[in-house]
Image (cartoon, grey):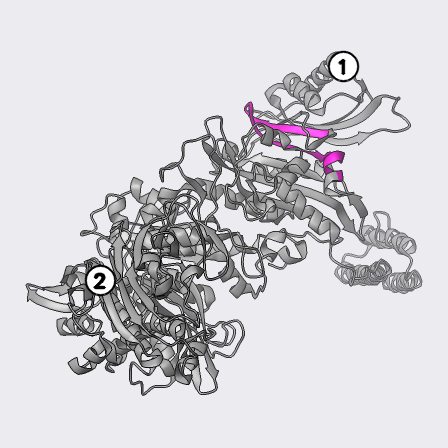
Amino acid sequence: MKEKIDEITQEALKEIESAKGDRASLEAARVKYLGRKGMITELFKSMAQVDPAERPEAGRLINILKDNVTKALDDQLLSLAKVEEAGGRLDITLPGISRRLGKKHPITKTIDEILGIFISLGFRVVEGPEIETEYYNFEALNIPLEHPSRDAFDTFYIETVDRRPETVDQKYLLRSHTSPVQIRFMEKNKPPFSIVVPGKVYRPDATDASHSFMFHQVEGLAVGDNIRFSDLKGILSIFARRIFGSKTRLRFRPSFFPFTEPSAEVDISCIICKGQGKCSVCGGKGWLEILGAGMVNPRVFENVGYDSEKITGLAFGMGVERIAMLKYGIDDIRLFFENDIRFLRQF
Amino acid sequence: MRISYNWLKDYIDLNISPERAAQLLTMAGFPVEAVNKIPGDCLFDIEVTSNRGDCLSFLGIARELSAITGSKLKMPLSLRGRSPKQSQKTGLLRPFGARNDKEIQSAVSVKVEDKKLCPRYTARVIRGVKVKESPKWLTKRIEAMGLRPVNNIVDITNFCLFETGEPIHAFDLDKISGSHVIIRRAKKEERVLTIDGIEKILNETDLVIADEDKVIAIAGVMGASNTEVTDSTKNILFEAAYFDPVTIRKTSRRLGLSTESSYRFERSVDISNIAYSSNRAGELVIDLAGGEGGEFVDIGIKTGGEISITLRYPYLDKILGLALPRSEVDRILESIGFNISSHSDGKVKLKAPQFRQDIRREIDCIEEVGRIYGYEKIKETIPSIVEGGDRLPFNRIVDNRIKDTLNGLGMDEATTYGLLSKKILIMSGLEGNIRDKNIVELKNPLTSDQEVMRPSLLPGLLNSMRWNINRKAALINLFELGKVYTKDGNGRFREAEHLSLGLVGEARAFWFEGARPASFFDLKGIVETLLSELGVDSPSFERIEDSLFSPAAAASITVNGDKVGVIGEISGQVLADFDIKEKIFASELDIDAILNYAKLEKRFKGLPLYPSVVRDMSIIVDEGASNAELIASMKSAGGSILKNVELLDRYKGKQIPEGKIGLTYRLEYQDLMKTLEDKDVVRLHANVIKELEQKFAITLR
């Protein structure tokens, strides 16, 4: 029995070795030795005729034989598989099949970022119409007709030949700022509240690298029984540091807006030269103006029927294009509206 | 406003650098935009806000610096007053109102016809002046302000304007007929040649200075050339006055003529200081041009009235978020010219300085305290803003979903202008809107590119696509979410949110499978995916005729019978007008209409317990058959068990007869209550086929 086993071992390993690299011969060898009628299977069957005393030893030897043949076959098949796969080798430097994502417009991204910051501070988002009346755009905000404070608000008016104009309620215009939404909101809601208002505004400015007749603003208004100027500073500092980085310094300068008092202009330390006053972006001043803000003028509260003795409010407004230009280093406002995909796809 | 630092130092001792002074002014609300060093001087470019007309002068700025630095203000000599002896010599400091002065027989008379528009008018006569070049110190001052010196008289009026902020005009007295000065409204279409050499046509809302037979100045704006001071002038009449700011502003704006003078009158000059300014000018004339002081006429009110304000200290602390010592509040207010009348019970009664026309209420005083105390010293606090309700309105949540979805589908977001030309509307096949007068037009457009508000997003989108095509972009897929504006029959304006989508170029340009041009169905697929993502069920697409789209592919999109949009291939005519050679596919959706159907909230539906059975079916049908109708028929025959029908293949070729088309559909059958048995499927599928045979005369392949 032992001789027979040795003989088959020799023969099988030799045959497998010579079948190297040939899947069909290897398969034939597997059938010949390990198949249902294979030589090793037959050996197991012939165990019944072996002397019972020799059976354990014979069984052990046949099992060793089976393991050796199986291993030899597996090894050959594995190396064969490797060779075969290598033959279909890909040029892995070919480009991946693109699943290009579209991009949001940088103005959208900037507005979303601004709104996100204020939402996290407890503000909610409110919108209003772009075609406004003179009352909401000016009068209610304490910007009287024929007053020099209107110089900052050149305005597109709407043709209303089919109407009788004259009163401020019927004189239509394209809002020159988002502040009319303050009035519309306060007319319908009672304090306390805090809102942010994004939207398009229009001013008849000749278009160049830094002027556009249409641009975007975000306006904020928080009204309650204990809103203070110090709160305005706190909120806008958080905003500026979140959007321009934690090292940003702020500067509040007294200013004048008809609808706020006290009023302030807010500068941030130049994000290019880090406030050193050494670059052209800040004009060597080290500061960049980004916001107008202030405490709501009591006259504005009175115009919407609030008791200006009982409540106070803070308000602020910013130009989105300006912030986007600073954040992304964009040097020409017209790029926002050309929609050149080489521009849009950068953000 | 320009300020020469050297000149400024005539009125205040400053032991600080110009840069430091600039910083102090900036932080007090007078931003110094530029500090320009020139030999021997330093020029500030200061922005003065429209409420601070009192600071449009060297004295005004010096007064502010005095309040900030504590350094004393040095008033020029005549404004402080001179000894009686000097005043007799010049004839200028006698009691104002020369008509009271018996020594001088007045040869001039002043008549103010409209006291509302001119509450105070002064005229001062100086006779026997010698008009000549100004001395060096004066020309230097005038040149520092960027002006060209003219002669001593004109230079003095300019000098006084910059020094005191009060515009002063000099007339040649001998050219005023009858020496009668009349302040009146202009007559309709009255004409005057002003000193800039341009004739102005006036109307009844303008205020003018006139003599008996002509206009000699447009009040507060510009003098007429007929009474201009020339080298031969001997006797002059100085005007210093207060004119109604609104009237001056209207005239200045209508004539497009803004002068140093009108700029200051618009912002209100200090009515109580007019005589002094006139005095200062007169003195300078006598010093520099000789002559003798004559009549001085002063008509109207002498002050703007006292403004008394009560300031509550706790209210000030509440607004600013401060706890300032009351003595500090008082000190600040006094430093900027307030008079403290009395204290009582946490309050202080104040009188505002005459020159501060902008101070009217308690809040104005609070701002002043904050401003001079320094905003930078107010500590930051965080308010507790507690409010319920949604952070974002539903329409913005939907907007965000739209943008995210379209980005995921490879679409880039565009932003175009809300104002367009009529021409581009016509090019985009929208002349109907212009004809029907439902577009919103501007009264005062800057250019014809911005004359109407967009009634559709597509013209702007086409414009952006053309821009990119001209720059050789291979695939352009843009969308824009924004408002469109229309006007109804009653002239009411409507703003609606729309979405535009546009596609042009190679839909796939991969090395892997080769390029293929974008098609109508690429865009339709994007719209369908978007609507599905918004929870809008089964939109239907129906063929329409539309001047913007080609008859080959133009469809309306409806949901529940509501038209929510259009989609199609841009017509050849429109493409030709835009000079575009590529095929463009575009769609516009009315998002406000879609909002009625949008469902973003999700509810979990249990997974089916029983497997579905899939059967593919290849049919041959007339080429004109509608896919939507075929599927509708299959669904009606298949009933609720037919879960889904999908078109797998559309084939035209050898085995398909002329005028026919081969279609392969995959039908998915599923019963939610039990496992479908083969015989059930066979029966249902046979029904479906039978229905198609009857309705569409299909044959199976």
Q: Nearer the viewer, residue B271 or B113?
A: B113
Most prominent secondary structure in the magenta stretch? strand
Asked whether, in this view, residue A231 is left or right of residue A201, the answer is left
Work out whether residue B457 or residue A245 is closer to the camera in this orientation and state it. B457
Query: In the image, what residue type sits under mark 1?
Result: Glu
Circle 2 crowding by C-alpha within 10 Å: few under 14, some 14–19, many from 20: many
**Of marks 2 and 1, which one's residue comes earlier in the chain?**
2
Q: Report which residue position mark 2 lands on.
A: B298
Residue B114 within the magenta-colored segment of the rendering: no
Q: Is residue B574 magenta?
A: yes
Picture coordinates of residue B282, whole percent (x, y): 29, 73
* Label of residue B693 in the image: 1
Residue B144 image point, x, y percent: 44, 78
Nearer to us in this view, B349 or B45: B45
> Looking at the figure, which quarter contains the C terminus of chain B?
top right
Number of residue marks: 2
